[in-house]
Amino acid sequence: MSDRVDEVLLQRRKVFWDQQEPSLQAMIQTVSSDGLADDDADEIMAYLPDLTGKRVVDLAAGIGRFTTRMAKVARHVTAVDVAQAFIMENRVANQHLGNISFICDDVVNLDFPAGSLDLVFSNWLLKYLSDAEITHFLTRALKWLSPGGFIFFRESCYGLLGTEELNGNPTMYRSSRYYCDKLTAIPAQDDESAFTLVRVKNILAYINYQNAPNQVCFLAKVCGGDGIPQEPQKQQCRLSPLNAAALQKVFKGPCVTVGGDVSTRLHFEMSPDLAVDCDINTYDVIHSRETCHNVSEKQHLFDKLLRCVKPGGTVFITDYCLGSSPPSQPFLAHTHDIAPCYLETVDSYSEKMRMAGFKGVVAKDLSQELIKALQDELSILVTTCGDTDEDKMNHSQVTALWNSKLQWVKDGYLTWSSFMLTK
């Protein structure tokens, strides 16, 4: 057995699942509220790529919560579970579909031919694996997937919330950042393919039913190799202000209450700004801070924001814009080469917002506020610096950039502006 497999942990998870009754309650490990299990499964399916004609492996498939749904669309599904009773229940329920293979084994023992799968899917699997086993599994999954294929997994992060504590349960709770880092750190295969994160978000059903924002799903795509370009590294596992802290969907009442706990009513997401669609008329308020200047397709972005916000809703944006003075060469060098971005004037922003269909567009120059903020931060930087050479180098670079940015604003090359949009 590979030294990347923890034999003791493997036995613990097998014993634990062999002791469970093959049931829905055992799989979700909670006394289900009416509608929770179905809403949860429907939501997970909605986050998957199109499975029409695809080859899928359903890991930790259990009694077939997702096997059934995927097999009705996919070309073929391989259902895998470590517990014999669960995979037998899955077989009884789904073998009539005719396009499912059933395997009883631990995921660390699996292997598939290179490029033979289009989706590797798991729901509550990685939390039972050791760090080394996760790396081992993800490395293999990258090999199994075809160019442009996807891996999707959902995990309980941070701690026990929304599920029951069961004796002998070998679950290990980790942060969502841990899983992001694991995915993007998997070494590229011989053809230089690697995982690029497409979406990371928490599950709305568990927020609505259990006030549990710790249920998080991850979708990554195989990029590079066979002519598929490797996506920019800056899009891998970055917290998008537009789709995460900005697009906070409010559940069960107002977002802020005096003395209230807001944390369980926020929905967070990580994804490239234009990579994921939301339902039409979803949000009352959308807030974006210093995001738009990183997006080249601004008209597409504003069109999407109009779609997402409800009629009468508000979009509030703050961002860097081009000033009225002709830019200097150092400024152009920084914005074109050193830290590439897509700056436009306030008038250009406003025109594209109106073209998208926003009826009220109110722009305000906040450059004086930016000058004050930069001066305050520089005064703090003067008194703070680490002891190592790396700390000193980073401190010097940040100080130089802040001084340059301050001068660019004073010289009129750069502005900081707010935009209030109404649908």
Image (spheres, rainbow, N blue to C red):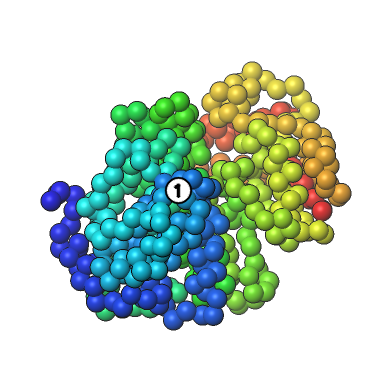
Residue nearest the observer in this picture, 258 or 87 = 87
Q: Quadrant of residue 86?
A: bottom left
Q: Is residue 134 left or right of residue 314?
A: left
- Residue farthest along the right direction in this orientation: 359
Q: Is residue 325 left or right of residue 227?
A: right
Residue nearest the observer in this picture, 321 or 98 = 98
Q: Quadrant of residue 266?
A: bottom right
Q: Residue at x 68, y 31 (%)?
A: 343
Q: Residue at x 64, y 18 (%)?
A: 329
Residue nearest the observer in this picture, 284 or 329 = 284
Q: Residues within 10 Å of mark 1 (few under 14, many from 20)?
A: some
Disc 1 target residue = 75
As helix, strand or loop, the secondary structure at mark 1 comes to loop
Which percent across, then down, holds residue 94? 40, 64
Q: Residue at x 73, y 43 (%)?
A: 302
Q: Which amino acid is tagged 1?
A: Arg
Residue nearest the observer in this picture, 422 or 192 = 192
Residue 84 visible to the viewer: yes
Q: How many marks?
A: 1
Which percent across, then down, holds residue 332? 63, 22
Q: Is residue 215 left or right of residue 2?
A: right
| Image position of 252 with respect to 188: above or below | below
Which percent across, then down, holds residue 311? 81, 58
Which percent across, then down, holds residue 244? 58, 54
Q: Residue at x 33, y 34 (%)?
A: 188
- Residue farthest along the top direction in this orientation: 329
Residue 316 visible to the viewer: no
